[in-house]
Image (spheres, rainbow, N blue to C red):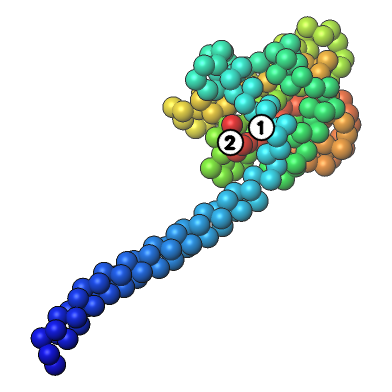
């Protein structure tokens, strides 16, 4: 091979080798990007599936209640929200408010109380502990307390507040979690807002047997809610 031919071959190799390497690296990077996008897509789909109950309306409630009840930075710093605050937070009728929680049927529990009582019985305590243990990575534990319509409205508001706080007190005594005050949101609704209808009697609840509209409203609705807000 002549000297000129050897020089031509070396020049050809000098040009071809970097081009081949660039093509190889590009193909490899493209493959990794494709795999990464595929993994991200799978994660997103799984997340959507797991959080299917987090409707836009429920997210709005979670966001507002979390702020108004002192669970997030910039909130009121208080421990709980009373009915007037709840009405402003929800901006919905009682029926619409309750309808938003129906997708939580397999996740939520209803702690029932005797007439004019706010103490947790043994079954109620067990249900509170069961609900607390079912966190599944969620951030907020909601306690939405009610009262049946017998008696004075102001009295029933105080009764529903005491029922919500009874759940919180049991959690504090039983688990002694230092982060509990950042996780538990209390909302007490008295008798004049968001009454439950008897279909909620089919949910997980602390009192077995017969269940009426009045009985289901002597209660605290409890559930972990994992909605990104």
Q: Position of residue 30 (x, y in %)?
A: 43, 63
Within-10-Å neighbours for mark 2: few <14, some 14–19, many 20+ = few
Q: Position of residue 214 (x, y in %)?
A: 87, 25
Q: Which label belongs to residue 59?
A: 1
Identity of the residue drawn at 78% across and 12% down: 156
Quarter of the image with the C terminus in it: top right
In depth, the one of 101 and 156 nearer the eye is 101
Identity of the residue drawn at 78% across and 27% down: 97
In depth, the one of 59 and 180 nearer the eye is 59
Q: Left or right: 100 with respect to 95?
A: left
Which structural element holds mark 2?
loop
Identity of the residue drawn at 69% across and 45% down: 52
Labels 1 and 2: the sequence-earlier one: 1
Q: Which label belongs to residue 161?
A: none
In depth, the one of 158 and 92 nearer the eye is 92
Identity of the residue drawn at 58% across and 36% down: 228
Location of residue 107 by image quarter: top right
Q: Which residue is mark 2?
A: 228
Q: Position of residue 38 (x, y in %)?
A: 53, 60
Q: Is residue 42 above or below residue 76?
A: below
Quarter of the image with the N terminus in it: bottom left
Which structural element holds mark 1?
helix
Q: Position of residue 106 (x, y in %)?
A: 72, 45
Q: Is residue 160 above or below residue 58?
A: above
Q: CA distance from mark 1 to mark 2?
A: 7 Å
Q: Left or right: 37 with respect to 91?
A: left
Location of residue 83 by image quarter: top right
């Amino acid at each position: 091979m002549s000297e000129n031919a050897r020089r031509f071959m070396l020049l050809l190799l000098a040009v071809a080798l970097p081009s081949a390497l660039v093509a190889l690296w590009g193909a490899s990077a493209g493959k990794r990007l494709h795999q990464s996008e595929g993994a991200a897509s799978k994660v997103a789909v799984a997340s959507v599936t797991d959080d299917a109950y987090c409707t836009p309306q429920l997210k709005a409630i979670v966001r507002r209640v979390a702020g108004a009840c002192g669970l997030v930075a910039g909130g009121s710093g208080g421990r709980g929200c009373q009915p007037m605050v709840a009405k402003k937070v929800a901006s919905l009728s009682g029926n619409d408010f309750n309808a938003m929680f129906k997708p939580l049927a397999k996740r939520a529990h209803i702690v029932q109380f005797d007439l004019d009582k706010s103490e947790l019985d043994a079954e109620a305590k067990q249900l509170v502990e069961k609900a607390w243990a079912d966190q599944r990575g969620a951030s907020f534990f909601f306690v939405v307390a009610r009262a049946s319509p017998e008696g004075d409205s102001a009295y029933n508001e105080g009764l529903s507040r005491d029922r919500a706080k009874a759940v919180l007190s049991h959690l504090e005594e039983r688990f002694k979690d230092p982060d509990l005050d950042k996780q538990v949101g209390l909302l007490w609704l008295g008798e004049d807002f968001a009454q439950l209808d008897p279909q909620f009697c089919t949910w997980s609840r602390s009192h077995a047997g017969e269940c009426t509209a009045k009985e289901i409203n002597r209660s605290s609705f409890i559930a972990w809610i994992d909605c990104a807000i």
